[in-house]
Amino acid sequence: MQLRSFILLGFCAVFGMGSPAFASPANLATSPSVEKTDAIPVAAKSDASKSDASQLRLLKKKKNPTSDDLAEIKKLEAKIAAAATKAELEDIYLPYKPKRRTKAEIARERGLGPLAEAILADRSAVPGELALAYVTEEVPDAKAALEGARDILSEQFAENADLVGKLRAYMKERAFLRAKVADGKQESGAKFSDYFDHVEHWAGVPSHRALAMLRGRNEEVLSLDIEVDADDQSPVKPVERMIANAYAIGGNLPGDKWLMEVASWTWRIKLSLHLTLDLMRDL
């Protein structure tokens, strides 16, 4: 499976075990040879007879691997072996995936990583007071420091593969698909009139109705959305509570209150859209 091979190559790059030129989709697809790195030889082709576990074990031949390297490889090996779907594999790879420079990366460069760690570790401390120690020329005040810490923690929460998997499973069980007609399209889109104001449980949508609604969206007659916990009136939605529970957030201490806001922000800004797109693709 090409995705598994690509993930493994990504791990090579993270641990300094392979060349950037080799860890590219183009080389994955085209090179049947064995590429040489200064650490180990790695098969460039996707060989179905070679298990993912054995490929990961090759990584252990890296020059001077640390005990942390080997421990991380062991965990990744187990997770990849247990992954049953493409989405689960993508969740595992997400923290290692090359990406554009993020707000979290900028915040780390400005020295705000320790602030995020301190708030997560000591819930009794007041985040605003901790932030004062991180005010610099690049971080003008405590508010800016806390925003940077939020960006760092939000990225960490959103890249937690176990958490994302649980949220996806929850959405597949509880979400509803809603279709609405676009303004002014009632007449020209009459063939989709069955879906002008339509809601049904995502898990129960048969393929023919899913295709009809997707076609209506592609023709700009319908808008589609996936809703979860829309009728839940609690101040903290169940999906937000799941994020909080993954990091033992929930007390009345100053740090807990601030972290709960970060958990809610992570859902609204990062995970909600990501998982909605996943479910749309699975229709």
Image (cartoon, rainbow, N blue to C red):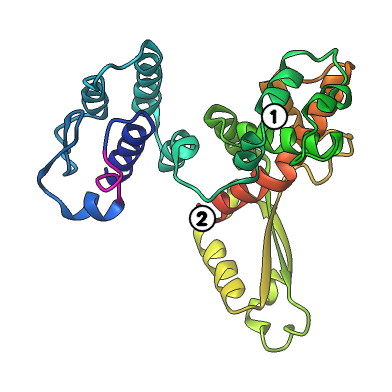
Tell me which numbered mark, 2 or 1, is placed earlier along the sequence. 1
The magenta stretch spans residue 81? no
The percent position of residue 131, horizontal first and vertical second, equals 82, 27
Vertical placement of residue 27 versus 93, above or below: below
Whether residue 259 is visible, yes or no, is yes
The percent position of residue 199, horizontal first and vertical second, equals 72, 58
The percent position of residue 145, horizontal first and vertical second, equals 78, 35
The percent position of residue 174, horizontal first and vertical second, equals 68, 40
Q: Residue furthest front?
A: 137
Give the residue type at disc 1: Ile
Could you classify mark 2 by the number of other residues whose Cα lies within 10 Å: few (under 14), some (14-19), or many (20 or more)? few
Gap in Å between the C-alphas at discs 2 and 1? 23 Å
Side (left or right) of 16 relative to 132: left
Residue at figure coordinates x 57%, y 74% from the top left: 218
Side (left or right) of 229 relative to 62: right
- The image quadrant that residue 156 belongs to is top right
* Magenta-tinted stretch: 19-24
Closer-to-camera residue (85/5): 5
Side (left or right) of 65 relative to 27: right
Residue at mark 1: 243
Closer-to-camera residue (157/170): 157
Could you classify mark 1 by the number of other residues whose Cα lies within 10 Å: few (under 14), some (14-19), or many (20 or more)? many
Chief SS of the magenta region: loop
- The image quadrant that residue 235 belongs to is top right
Give the number of the disc on residue 281: 2
Side (left or right) of 248 relative to 209: right
